[in-house]
Image (cartoon, coloured by chain):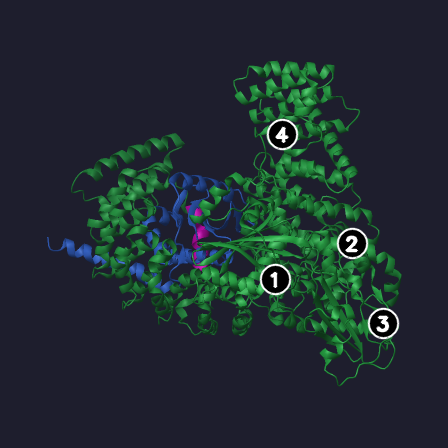
Chain colours: A green, B blue
Amino acid sequence: MSDVVEKTLTALPSLLSLDSQPGSAKLSSTSKLGNLIRGITELTSKHEEEKLIQCELSSIKEQVSSPNTTMMKELMVRTIYCEMLGYEASFSYIHAIKLAQQGSVLEKRVGYLAVSLFLNESHELLLLLVNTVLKDLQSTNLIEVCMALTVVSQMFPKDMIPAILPLVEEKLNHPKEIIRRKAVLALYKFYLIAPNQVQHIHNKFRKALCDKDPGVMTASLHIYLQMIQENPEGYKDLTASFVTILKQVVGGKLPMDFNYHSVPAPWLQIQLLRILSLLGKNDQSTSEIMHEVLDESLRRAEMNHNITYAILYECVKCVYTIHPKSELLEKAAKCIGNFVLSPKINLKYLGLKALTYVVQQDPKLALQHQMTIIECLDHPDLIIKRETLELLFRITNAQNVTVIVEKMLEFLRISKDDHTTIDLVGKVAELAEKYPSNHYTYAPDNEWFIETMNTVFSVGGDMMQPDIPNSFLKLLSEGFDSVEEDRKLRLFAVNSYISLLRGEPGKLPQRFLQVISWVLGEYSHLRADLEPALVLRLLAKLLDMKNCSSETKSWVLTAMTKLCEGGSGVSVAQQVSETYGSSLDTVLRQRAQELQHLSQDSELRARVLPRGAGLDRSLTYCHNLVQVDSSLSFLDGFVSEALAAGAAPYKPPHQRQEELAGTKALSLEPYGLSLPISMSSCITDRQSPTLLSMSSGLSATLKLDGVKRVWGREGYLSQKEPVEEPAQVEVPSPLRSPSQQGEADSFHSQTPSLTPTPESDQEKQQLASSLFVGLGSQSSVCLMGKSEPTTQRFRRKAKGHSTASSTSEQVSNSVISPPSTVDNLLCNNLLDSNITSELAVSSPQLTSRLSQGLAATNGTCDTDTELPESDRKESKPAVIRDSYVVAADPAPHEDPDRPKDLALSSHLPAELSELSHSEITHLCTNQNLELSVCHVQKEDSLLLIVFISNSSDSAVQQILVCLFSGVLFGEEAFTCWCDVVGIVSLLISRVCCRPLTVSTEEYGTMWLAFSHDTKQNLTLISDGQEPLTATLNVLKRRLQLHVVEIIGMEGIVACRLLQDQPCLMHCRVHAGTLAVWLRSPIPDLPDCLIYHCQRALQGH
Amino acid sequence: MQFMLLFSRQGKLRLQKWYVPLSDKEKKKITRELVQTVLARKPKMCSFLEWRDLKIVYKRYASLYFCCAIEDQDNELITLEIIHRYVELLDKYFGSVCELDIIFNFEKAYFILDEFLLGGEAQETSKKNVLKAIEQADLLQEVRHLIKITPN
């Protein structure tokens, strides 16, 4: 800030003692406005102010309506003032319009201002302004034209745009740059409110972009930013121009006027950086154009002023959004570090925010700053704390979830802001359900889960998303893998709720009470020593509470109906039913009636409310539905009608939220293999499938498949083999870069060396170790969203591993790299249908691994090795998993002159040589070994054949083959299959898809039965034919889908994977794109398939 | 930018500019809540706030708070500089500005704002150009005024 301002503003308070000296020199003491303002400041109560203003307004009203008033401008200013104070003066709106229409220039200006302040663009009076604007746009007076353009850029009735569009367009050629600039902004406004109205003048935008005046050019960037946001593909050709402009700006080629604190045109720079990041996202060649200028920007922006920080921040975001370049990433990471470590709180906040963006791609950054993050957790400013929690939420894994959830709950208890509470409560519930059992901390899992949910319910109260209690109840009722564990969990919930009810139930929110009564009604019988009558009495106490809503009462009565047995129990029930039998609330009265009848007839009760029937019945019962049609099929007609009419497809609330959150974060797009990227980044912008299935499970409907899968396995599998876990985690990875490696190691040993501040106390150290656990070793795996399928496999592997562990350990740790890293690689492969190119990239890594493996086995080997592929059919998963060590028979050495392919294929076993096999892909070589693969497609399975040829002259004694599967589907059978395909992770679709021949009717029934779905728009292909048919034909050809039927603009398609796992696809042409909706019983299949559809169509 | 509010340390609104269509009732509610939240914050705290689904960027100049609401993807720091540039413009125009200038000449403050930000976007970032535009409008008005008076 300039010194002058500083001085004046600090001197201000003395000037401001209005009460003591009302006639300061600054006041225009004669004006009526001055009088009004002074009058108001002298008042002491709100009531007096109201009286004064009402009086003022009625006097204004009188004066404005009298003809020939000369005070119009002054009156209008006073009205604006009254409106600002919060008093309505709608009578003056029409006068404001009149003033803009008829007044002198001086009055016009105030008139326009009043209009822009009083009305918004949907106000009906605005129509009256159109003529005035038209007239002023044609005026020869520049000021009038400016005023008209200014008001148009702020608000204009959408329907009237065509009336003035030609005039505004004309102004783009005006000799005065201020007019051109305002015209561009007016067009921007039109674009925002009615994009199709200005579609035909896109070439004029280009002209504005090339305007010789930097102001006009800057203004045109607003339009471009918007358009590129909507369709980045359409403007790739402009990248070079934007880069050139940015180069010129950064190089200081603009007039000095545009400097701001000696930084050239910062607003322009930031706008350009935002545009560039949109253009470079997922586009390597476009990104390469901008690398140089980004580097320049990062270099030029020296750290000294807020404005350079603003540019740096935007640069960092851009660098992390576009196709990565390691040098730039390094610099950007350094910048983030500077931000985070800055003593300036605003910069610290932005640093945390940037860290939150990039942490999924680059978890080690969070590790670097762990102590700062810990400090921020205790920051007195809640905003900083909140942002830190957001960051922690993104790095949550099974190992640190307890600590992070605890921190979040701590924050929730002090937060007073509803919006934050709702958001955080949702996140805690999500985490609690995702990682319900936690064997890393020695806390009993059930306790932790129930207690966390208790806090969620009491803090979140009645504000939280309704699907949180719903999905909690579903979890509880559907149970998990083990009956015994289910029983324990429910029992724990019952105990916990009983003690809550014995305390002060009056303080609990209604939603929580509803949950409590349902659980008690359903499961209190699990506690043998608990008299039903006691529970009934506790429940009856709830009914007597003053603040108990009738909805809660109805839940309570229902619970009582389930429990009323035994002498004393029935008498309590009778009492209650008598009280509510005459209730005015019909629902309550009905419940009371039911209670009365069923408490008397225990046989009937057992039939109506069978114990342990779980959620379906109870919810049905509660909601007065006769039968639950969980697919809501009776609405399908309605839905398809609405969709046909152009309605947006339904998304459950959590998914919507996630999508919002998704736009917040930086790109999570695949980056190829140029740097070690976390797995989560391989999932394209559809977001992590796990998250999706998670959230759809949490949705308000009764679907539960997602939830069950997510937490069942996670918890119980791990409990069975907790001992083996740590050993696995510690295995160092040969694939990681040395720096990362070092970090992970130092992190693991938990030595003080990782603390930037040695004096920081031990407590923080401990917190750090509990918060950042798992980030280092499993770098990519544990990050949010992708964690549980990986850990799951991880654990399963540990089971098999135990048999072979001695061997593998003896050989070398380096051969068995941690699953995380390999998964990472695999995932990349998996998602890419162009397998050969991917393999080319991955082979160096394989080579390195291979060579290390060889080094460990001393390179003593003399045979070609073929893996006995018959062992690897999915029918024998156990064998596969355990077959880490495959000793091979010596076979004749290959003649090196023979064509490789032929040579290798001759080694195919006889029973397979008849079948068609894929081209043999060469994976990697070092001087001793060569690795090639191919796959053979059988009717019922897919075989992977790995050829290992030894080209050295020493003998191979032992070969260790590790296969790691990519993340595919949650289903057991399928995972086994993946294990086989493993290392090459063949494209699921082209290889494993089989057309599924069904009739339209069968399709209909299947459609309703499947629970996992995905929707997305695909590009249509039109080569002469009708686009839908053409597109479907391409898909059919490329992915082996079966087109069931095409009806008009819609088509249905079916396919299946091996093992007869179907996936159905519904396609509809809508607004130039193909809206597809996939459903399948297998959780991630729709996501996978849609990806391959995209690829197939792109490649076409 | 979604809106801009200027209010005093006592919580009195001095200027409001809304770039998104909202009903009066909503505007009042937002203003009341925001003024309360911002005034409750301590001087050394972060200038950014997460509020509902918006980001609030505020800065205090003497007794006056300048408060902008932006969307999540917008740059907080540059918004802070927008506020500062606006203060600089006011300062230049009024010649060391104080709250009273804005109270008694709030329509001028609006005119300056409209030359600087249009429809929620920075329209002209050159200080000279903004002031030139305002001065021209002022000047022309005065000339017209004189012409109107002289013939009589």
Q: Nearer the viewer, mark 4 or mark 1?
A: 4
Q: Are marks 3 and 1 on the same chain?
A: yes
Q: Secondary structure at mark 1?
A: helix
* Residue shown at the point (57%, 68%) measured from the top left: A323
Which residue is labeled 1 in the image?
A336
Which residue is labeled 2 in the image?
A796
Q: Where residue A403 sits: x, y (%)?
A: 72, 47
Mark 1 chain: A
Q: Where residue A58 sits: x, y (%)?
A: 26, 34
Residue found at the far bottom of this picture: A897
Q: Nearer the viewer, mark 2 or mark 3?
A: 2
Q: Residues within 10 Å of mark 1 (few under 14, many from 20)?
A: many
Mark 2 chain: A
* Residue shown at the point (67%, 66%) measured from the top left: A676
Q: Secondary structure at mark 4?
A: helix
| 2 or 3: tag closer to the N-terminus | 2
The foreground one among A1042 and B132 is A1042
Which residue is labeled 4 in the image?
A514
Query: Marks 2 and 3, Cα distance to the nearest angstrom?
Result: 26 Å
Mark 3 chain: A
